Amino acid sequence: MPASVHLILVRVVEKMQEGKAIAVLPLTQELSTQAAADLLGVSRQFFVRECEAHKLPFHYTGTHRRVLLKDLLDYRKQREQARRDSIVRIARQSEELGDYDKFIAPEE
């Protein structure tokens, strides 16, 4: 068994032992707005507004919006990076104002 496959299987088993659900999906999997919102941990309406604001690509299947899993994962990564950058910026400002003795930025 290739080492990369073994590593993935070990991670899957670890997550299952933690009681987390596991799903294996192709990156081209189409998700409904509700499924995408659930994956992000946001409301469906918030997610629809993000789509309509062109913050991530989507398409219609009939009258229903669909988003590709790979696009959703890219969007999530961008949101997490923006959140991290904001936290670092606010903490550095607080350090400059004397609220922090020393701010140590989190590792990437």
Image: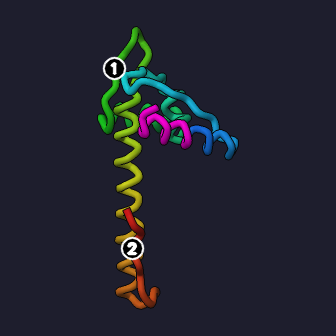
Q: Label 1, on which residue?
A: 59
Residue 105's mark? 2
Identity of the amino acid at label 2? Ala
Residue depicted at 39% across the width and 49% down the height? 79
- Vertical placement of residue 57 versus 75, above or below: above
Q: Is residue 96 magenta?
A: no
Residue depicted at 57% across the width and 38% down the height? 12
Report the span colored magenta.
1-11
The image quadrant of residue 13 is top right
Residue depicted at 38% across the width and 70% down the height? 88
State how the image is colored: rainbow
Q: Is residue 4 magenta?
A: yes
Circle 1 packing at 10 Å, graded few (<14), some (14-19), many (20+), is few
Query: Nearest the camera: 11 or 19?
Result: 11
- Vertical placement of residue 69 versus 85, above or below: above
Could you tell which of marks 1 and 2 lies nearer the N-terminus? 1
Q: What percent of the width, then of the height, locates residue 33?
A: 48, 27
Question: In what element is the residue under mark 1?
Answer: strand
Identity of the amino acid at label 1? His
Q: Is residue 44 left or right of residue 73?
A: right
Q: What percent of the width, then of the height, locates residue 23?
A: 55, 29
Residue 35's mark? none
How far apart are labels 1 and 2 at the CA level? Answer: 38 Å
State the quadrant of the C terminus: bottom left
Q: Is label 1 or label 2 in front?
A: 2
Circle 2 packing at 10 Å, graded few (<14), some (14-19), many (20+), is few
Give the total number of marks visible in the rendering.
Answer: 2
- Vertical placement of residue 8 versus 100, above or below: above
Question: In what element is the residue under mark 2?
Answer: loop
Q: Can you name the residue that lies furthest to the top here? A: 62
Q: What percent of the width, then of the height, locates residue 55?
A: 32, 38
